[in-house]
Image: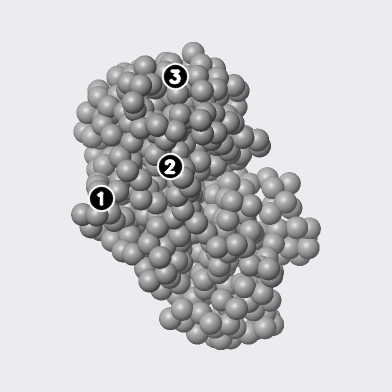
Amino acid sequence: MREITIPYGKTALTGHVEEKNFLGNYHAALPEAVNDEAAEVSRALDAPFASPKLEELASRVNDAVIISSDHTRPVPSRILMLQILARLRRGNPSIAITILIATGFHRATTEAELLDKFGPEIVGHEKIVVHDSSDESTLVRIGTLPSGGALIINRLAAEASLLVAEGFIEPHFFAGFSGGRKSVLPGVASRRTVLANHCAEFISHPKARTGSLDGNPIHEDMLFAAKAAKLAFIVNVVINAEKRIVAAFAGDCVAAHRAGTEYLSRHARIEVPEADIVVTGNGGYPLDQNVYQSVKGMTAGEAVCREGGVIILCASCSDGHGGESFYRHLAGALPQRILEEVQRIPRDRTEPDQWEYQILARILIKHTVIVVTEDCSHRMLGEMHLLAASSIDEALGMAFERCGAEAKVAVIPDGVSVIAAKKQDFTMGRTPVPAGKQGRFGKREN
């Protein structure tokens, strides 16, 4: 008997799989965090990709705007922001600096969250503005996206003499990776622009998947937006499960981000034999607080589970469904009907949460999904066409009833940290990102 452990809330859940059914335990194989995180960021700033140093860029201008991730992202901003501010002022002691919080489509970041993110020194002495995607008075149009949507962003970013961004790089379930260009779109873009970028046509594109950049129309829109906004310099980090820095990348927004994604792909891609049952999670707190966010972890299961198989997703979902529109659409129709209807919605008529219920409907058409939770209404999950269980073992029992006693089980403890693909996809050359030179796959535990 094999014991398995999946992050859940601020703790973890355990379950048991018979050896005859167990395919393996698959997770990213990131290196250990660096001993001195500040030194790693400094190293990256001293050797930027395809760009002069930040100090030199600052010496040419009178003002700068630094885009910073909001409260929903575990970016180590206390480390990054201090060094960015210092470098800008080293290049130009009198430079006027504004920190612009990239809330994207999220709620506003609170003062308490700013203090937690930056510390009292930065909050007390720096000019900080929180982006509001719905406040037309703070937005300006700077072009038209490849998708055809209006490119409207925060006026502060659009008019900055020097636009800089901090952030982190992780796998993203339809943009390929976070970081880089995402600081502009969706980070400081208008509601209209975000909706156009997240349209049904793009979400359904086969390249709009975890770890995929080349040919991904969502990424191409985002990249266009970053270039149009003249995002000049980024400082992005790769972090581990403990949210500590593993590596830092700085410089040109395209070159530095590409270097970071190539680095991450070498360690986060996992090769998994096609499974009948996949047990996975959403990384625990804070990412598993609702069903909406937990769709991300389900996509790792979707990538390696056979059609007609079962995905078991361990997530607290203590805040419920996570979006009224998301819940209403899923509860109101069968997944096939949802997908048919959403595909008819034109790019300029995208609705809030549409991408999330579209992806979940796509998963549900081909797979049974069982959510393991003790903190969320099982009845509500049922209304959303999700099965529910109170333990991993209970969920596995339900899965074996559907797939048979000989069903093979793959375990991906943290579905949001990996770029998963079936073994035959790698063998046939359908890898999400080209292999790097330092080893091809993440870690498998027998």
Q: Residues within 10 Å of mark 1 (few under 14, many from 20)?
A: some
Tell me the element at label 3. helix
Residue 228: x %, y % from top left:
37, 67
Q: Quadrant of residue 222?
A: bottom left
Q: Which residue is mark 2?
A: 24
Residue visible at 46% across and 53% down in the picture: 443
Image-based side of 444 in relation to 128, left or right:
left
> What is the spatial separation of the Cα atoms under label 3 and label 1, in whole angstroms?
29 Å
Percent position (x, y) of residue 2?
51, 34
Of callouts 2 and 1, which one flags the residue occurring earlier in the amino acid sequence? 2
Q: CA distance from mark 2 to mark 3?
A: 18 Å
**Residue for point 30% across, 19% down:** 334
Secondary structure at badge 2 equals: strand
Q: Secondary structure at mark 1?
A: helix
Amino acid marked by disc 3: Gly
Q: Residues within 10 Å of mark 3 (few under 14, many from 20)?
A: some
**Residue that mark 1 sits on:** 425
Please name whichever residue, 162 or 264, is drawn nearer the observer in this view of the structure.
264
Residue shown at 27%/27% (left/top)? 308
**Looking at the picture, how far across and down is residue 379, in whole percent?**
49, 13
The first of marks 2 and 3 along the sequence is 2
Question: Relative to 238, is 408 above or below?
Answer: above
Amino acid residing under circle 2: Gly
The residues bearing labels 2 and 1 have C-alpha atoms spaced at a distance of: 18 Å
Amino acid type assigned to the residue bearing label 1 in the image: Asp
Query: Mark 3 — residue?
Result: 397
Q: Nearer the viewer, residue 72 or 272?
A: 272
